[in-house]
Amino acid sequence: MNDNWQRKLIWSSLGGAAAVVPAIIVSGTSALWSVAAQAQQAAERLVIEEVVVTSRRREESLQDVPVSITAFSADSIERNMFKGIEGYFSRTPNVSFISSGSRDRKELSIRGVTNQLDTTEALVRASTFAFYLDDVNVVSATANPGVMDLERIEVLRGPQGTYFGRNAVGGAVNISTVKPEHDFFAQISGELGRYGTRDIEGVVNMPLIDDVLAVRANYKHYESDGHIKNINPIGGGNDSEYEYGRISLRYTPTDRLTVDLMATTSDEVVGMREGVPSGVMSVFAASLFGNVADPDGVGFYPDNRNRVNFDRPQQVGSKWELYTGKFEYDFDAFSLVGITGYIESDTFLQGDIDGSSQDFVYEDKPISRESISQEFRLQSAGNERLDWTVGVIYSRDEGEIFQQTFAGAGGLFGLPEDFQITSTVGENESTSAAVFGELTWHLNDRLDLVLGGRYTRDEVEVSQYNLSSGVINGFVEDKADFTDFSPKVSVTYALGESMDLFATVSKGFKAGGVQLGADFEESDFDPEELWNYELGFKSQLMDNRLRLNGSLFYLEWDDLQASFAVAETNDEGVIVFNSGIQNAASASNLGGELEVSAVLTENFVVNFSAGYVDAEFDDFTNAFIDGELYDLSGQAMPNAPEWTFSGDAEYRFTFAERYDSFVRLEWFHRDEILPDLVSLVRQDEGFPFRVPSYDHFNLRAGVETDRFSVTAYVENLFDEEYYTNAYQKAFLGGLHVQPSYQTWGVRITMRTL
């Protein structure tokens, strides 16, 4: 579809809506001051939508859980048109997300607790947050499934070790899909957007045996021509294709037993990382070619926001399959729950890695992972003086990597084309067993005491051999084991019907591991430990028309695991790449969050959130960056913006006396960040190491009935020019930045009653 035609369609749909938004906001602001008086007089009282969460493995109201949670219901997910992880993270206070490739190439920060590791390696569960889909840990390095037919998304801030286990140091993401129901339902959605975006989704729900057996199937196909173009006819572009399927079965033979089975598959290929040249060389590239970058026919950001010149096709992709089974049997006083999960995933990166039109170096890097987990838990029926949960879990993760780096036709250092510069074959296996439990003691009508904890034992085994300059350096293997107990204590006090206060002390644990460097010096790296001290409140005021939640926290973080990488030229004049993991000494984070939801009138709803964090290394005297040691003590943590804000305003009205209609304005802000450790060292140079703050606006408008809906949207409404990340394009191409872009489209949905 022609871009100009699409643009006219979208803007004609949104033009009238955009014109009335300022008036809506002004009238809504005035309405806020009169809400208290109107609430007492209104015959029909409006209330904020109740959100049900399962962060403690049982269904509870968001307002009753003494945990800092941002939760999105199915309706909220649909209104926001979330398409991936970046959508709901941008709406969560004190969360920062940066990406430089396909869905599994992500760096997440929650309250300044940042994943410092390269998750593209064979290491599994290497992140600082847990990612659960229907109660199964989907392994953070393969997480970020498509957002489709979801019942709920929960983002939990702070350590969540009791229920989510190891590596939930900074927090957890808990996603629940819509389960099969005993009524027929079908829905299909189609979307056309800028850059040749085509997206189709379908859902079918069918009862097979009345009130006993039902099935639900989902399918999604997304493709886009991409917003970055490769001017080199030899190389590939920024096009992407994503396919996702899920089938679920629910079996309820009696009122006591529920069995859920699910199979999920996804396949994604992205043409290249979504960055353009900055003109700033890496330290190693500058030592070889000088510190003046070559425009390479495309120029540098900001003059160039959408062009690259790669001499080889480059693809970053991932495939994964997830199979889960869950049963729950109700014994009246308590329930027995069993959960089984199995995951297979394959990711790959292949093609040009020097980041230029010169055919210097290319790479082939397939990574495969396999994970299996089994959990059993007993939990009380609830609503007793003592509510409790106890459980055990076992998991095994395996990963394999085969990374090869080759010389291209450019004759780097006189090497012949296709000469194998380096090759790494590595295997990683880890097993984990844990027992966990939590007890909630309702001391009286106002005061609750929560005691919880998890004891974990991990075993890690690594084997590897390296080949450099055509010479096999040998075979080495090593293993290590670690144990941890992560406790939690929380007290909740109800000030009345409308407000609860809570105080929490909890510990987070991230497993240690084993690494084998290029010189095969065996080296264990220690576990990370984090203590969280938190005060918070949750309230629903003004006859449940105003929800106000907030928290203050202080984190103490020890033995941080941080990646390092260096490229050197050996005595034979051949490039040798070396990387590993080191333990930084300590860090501390201090901050707070505020979330507000308000029903201003029958038709006007607003949401707002704010997050603040001051996160820095307390003691990091041995940071190994670009082959040198640095003292980063007192420096800010990478990917930890000081302030994050988000908000939305939605106005609903009747169009043509028959169609429910809406106009929705969204906004989020992220402060300046330093994306990685290299940026900390070179931050005084400014661009591109200091990624500036930015504001992003979206506008949506649509009409809907029980059977269909049409929504038009513009994302990055004002076409603001900024970049969200700066990363090193291997060692030869310097740094690339990930620029903003504007997109727009129309989405049509049809459904059965």
Image (cartoon, rainbow, N blue to C red):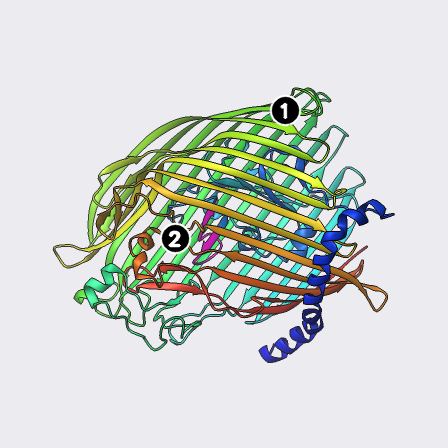
User: Are there few (<14), some (14-19), or many (20+) residues within 10 Å of tag 1?
Assistant: some
Give yes or no for residue 460 being in the magenta stretch: no
In this view, 541 is above or below 505 = below
Where is residue 323? Give x, y as percent. 57, 42
Q: Which residues are magenta?
A: 97-110
Q: Secondary structure at mark 1?
A: strand
Residue occupied by mark 2: 366
- The image quadrant where one finds the N terminus is bottom right
Where is residue 531? Give x, y as percent. 44, 32
* Quadrant of residue 527 within the rendered picture: top left
User: Are there few (<14), some (14-19), or many (20+) residues within 10 Å of tag 2?
Assistant: many
Q: Secondary structure at mark 2?
A: strand
Residue occupied by mark 1: 448
Q: So how many labels did they put on this image?
A: 2
In this view, 314 is above or below 77 = below
Where is residue 356? Give x, y as percent. 32, 69
Q: Is residue 103 left or right of residue 426?
A: right
